[in-house]
Structures are given as C-alpha cells and as structure tokens.
Image: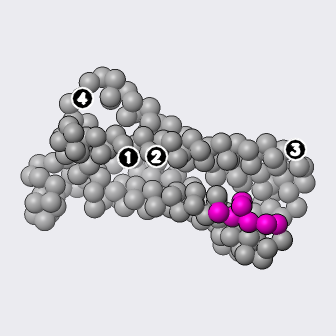
Amino acid sequence: MTTAHSPNANSATGAGTPRYAGLLIALHWLIALGIIGMLAVGFYMVGLPKGLPVKATLINLHKSLGLTIFLLVLLRIGARAVLHRPPLPAMPPWQRAAARTTQGLLYVGMVAMPLAGYLGSSFNRYGTRFWGILLPKWGWDDAHLRELFFGIHEAIAYLLIALVVLHVAGALKHQWIDRDNLLARMLP
C-alpha cells in the first residue's frame, strides 16, 4: 500500500518511481509549511515592543502552533517507524551520509525546539496555553532558566533555517543536476 501508485501518480512522477506513503508525504509538507510559518511569526513577534496586545496574541498562537507541529512531528516519527521508506537512488557514500545526517539533525531540531520553548515558558509566570488550555508548568518564575531555554530555542531556530536550506538545496540538486527523480518520492 505504501508504494502503490494510481495511474495519475505514475504519469506525474515516472512509472515505477518509489514513493513515500501518502501519510508521510502529507505530514512532510504540513510540517514544512508549519515550520516556515513558525519561524516567520517567531522572528516577527520578538521584534515587537513589550506590552503590545498583538504581541501577546502572537505569542500564544506561536505556542499553540508550535506544540501542534511538535505533535505532528511525533506522529511522523511513529509513521516512519512503521511505513515503508523508498530506497535512495545511487549516490556517492558522502552524499548518502550527508543526507542522513541532515535529516537526523532536522528531526532532533524539530523535537528539541518546541521542548526548549515549552521549558522556557515553564519558567515564567504566564506558562503555556495550548489552544486555550493551560498546560502544566515544569518550573517556577526564574529569569535565568527562562533565558537559558529561550536562548536554546532561538539557537535551534537558526540551526533549523540552515538545515532546511541544506535539505532543499540537496533536493533541488538531485532534481536538476543529478536528474535522479529523487524529489518525486515526496511530491503529493
């Protein structure tokens, strides 16, 4: 079922092109768009002056969306464990290692970033609301720990930007230079 093709899918990607399962494709693009949106909102909202009502709204939206994406990432990790992954096309060992390392670091970042944000929010008086529901706080009002976790959160944001750029560049290289149809594996 995970590599089955409809006739329309074959004509778009080439007959016999191995593809990811539909759930993994949907989660990939949903998470990708979510991360790009979250990075944009995150960098925008931190530049707003304190006390601005829209800033508080954006912060709460950022927390809820971030935790939603986190849950989607956990679902994707579980789905990857049970669903078939198509084999990579032939490539030099260093490229295979680079691809696996980049993907592994992307997953680490996608898990660590929301955890760091949640922990940072746990060390302030406001806590974290997940779509209106107040989540447990794992700390107390502590400016030093709050800044530590928010610093980690920000550092991971920059790391994720670099990894996303590297991931996209690798996919485009395979599509346009190597012409090995790698990108077709993850297209809807």
Identify the mark nearer the N-term, 3 or 2.
3
Q: Tell me the amino acid under the disc marked 2.
A: Val
Q: Decide whether residue 46 is among the magenta residues.
A: yes
Which stretch did the figure color magenta?
Answer: 44-50
| Residue 7 picture quarter | bottom left
Q: Which residue is mark 3?
A: 144
Q: Which residue is mark 1?
A: 168
Q: CA distance from mark 1 to mark 2?
A: 6 Å
Q: Residue at x 70, y 52 (%)?
A: 117
Q: CA distance from mark 3 to mark 2?
A: 30 Å
Between disc 1 and disc 4, the foreground one is: 1
Residue 27 falls left or right of residue 182: right
Q: Which residue is mark 4?
A: 91
Identify the mark nearer the N-term, 4 or 3.
4
- How many residues crowd around disc 4 within 10 Å: few (fewer than 14), some, or many (20 or more)? few
Which quarter of the image is occupied by the C terminus?
A: bottom left
Q: Residue at x 27, y 57 (%)?
A: 187
- How many residues crowd around disc 1 within 10 Å: few (fewer than 14), some, or many (20 or more)? few
Q: Residue at x 72, y 54 (%)?
A: 118
Question: Mark 3 and mark 4 in contact (Cβ < 8 Å)?
Answer: no
Q: Which residue is mark 2?
A: 164
